[in-house]
Amino acid sequence: MRNLFNHLDAEDILIRIDYVSADAKAQWGKMDAAQMLAHCSAFQDIAMGKSFPSRGWLGRLVGRFAKPLFYNDKPLPKNMSTIPDILITEPKEFELEKEKLKRKIITFQSNGRETCTPHPHPFFGKLTPDEWGKGIYKHLDHHLKQFGV
């Protein structure tokens, strides 16, 4: 399984982000390319311990049982629901969001597992740094595929 803590996997994601264009059309979902980048950036903030969305009742009830969906080898389902706090609906500036996300990925990868948040994921609950690294790679991969990259 690919993991954002792996330098080569992080590099792969960064290269793919560079291939996303401002006018790229989503193959599913409602976000445009700039909103997708902002959404992924907001998700990075959660993993880096800079944002702390609260856990909803559904996550508390079934999150730990569904947790392997976040970090296993199977692709995420298209049109999967998202954490309400990182649902991006307002217009965003594409180049700014692209650079912001790339900086966060570089920081996350270079800071290493020991600086990964101990705060629980808003749906899946407590994750190890390795689970975060795999899950974040999978999340980024999902959204890059959404835009054909």
Image (cartoon, rainbow, N blue to C red):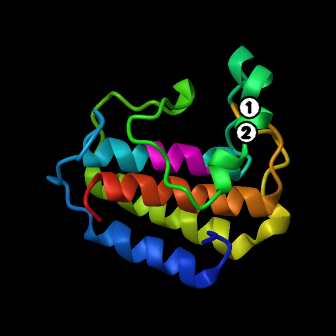
Q: Residues within 10 Å of mark 2 (few under 14, many from 20)?
A: many
Quadrant for the C terminus, please. Answer: bottom left
Per the rendering, the mark at residue 121 is 2
* Residue in view at x 48 percent, y 57 percent: 140
User: Label 2 is placed on what type of residue?
Assistant: His
* Residue in view at x 27 percent, y 54 percent: 147
Q: Nearer the viewer, residue 55 or 117?
A: 55
User: Label 1 is placed on what type of residue?
Assistant: Gly
Coordinates of residue 89 in the picture (x, y in percent): 34, 28
Coordinates of residue 54 in the picture (x, y in percent): 72, 24
Residue linked to disc 1: 63
* Residue in view at x 46 percent, y 78 percent: 12
* Residue in view at x 49 percent, y 54 percent: 75
Q: Residues within 10 Å of mark 1 (few under 14, many from 20)?
A: many
Q: Is residue 14 left or right of residue 90?
A: right
Q: Nearer the viewer, residue 67 or 144?
A: 67
Image: 137 above or below 76: below
Q: Are marks 2 and 1 in contact (CB under 8 Å)?
A: yes
Q: Is residue 97 magenta?
A: no
Residue 59 is drawn in which quadrant? top right
Residue 115 is drawn in which quadrant? bottom right
Image: 9 above or below 99: below
Residue interval drawn in magenta: 39-44
Q: Is residue 13 left or right of residue 55?
A: left
Q: Is residue 43 magenta?
A: yes
Instruction: Determine the secondary structure under disc 2.
Output: loop
Image: 79 above or below 59: below
Q: Earlier in the sequence, mark 2 or mark 1?
A: 1
Residue 28 is drawn in which quadrant? top left
Give the overall secondary structure of the magenta segment: helix
Image: 38 above or below 140: above
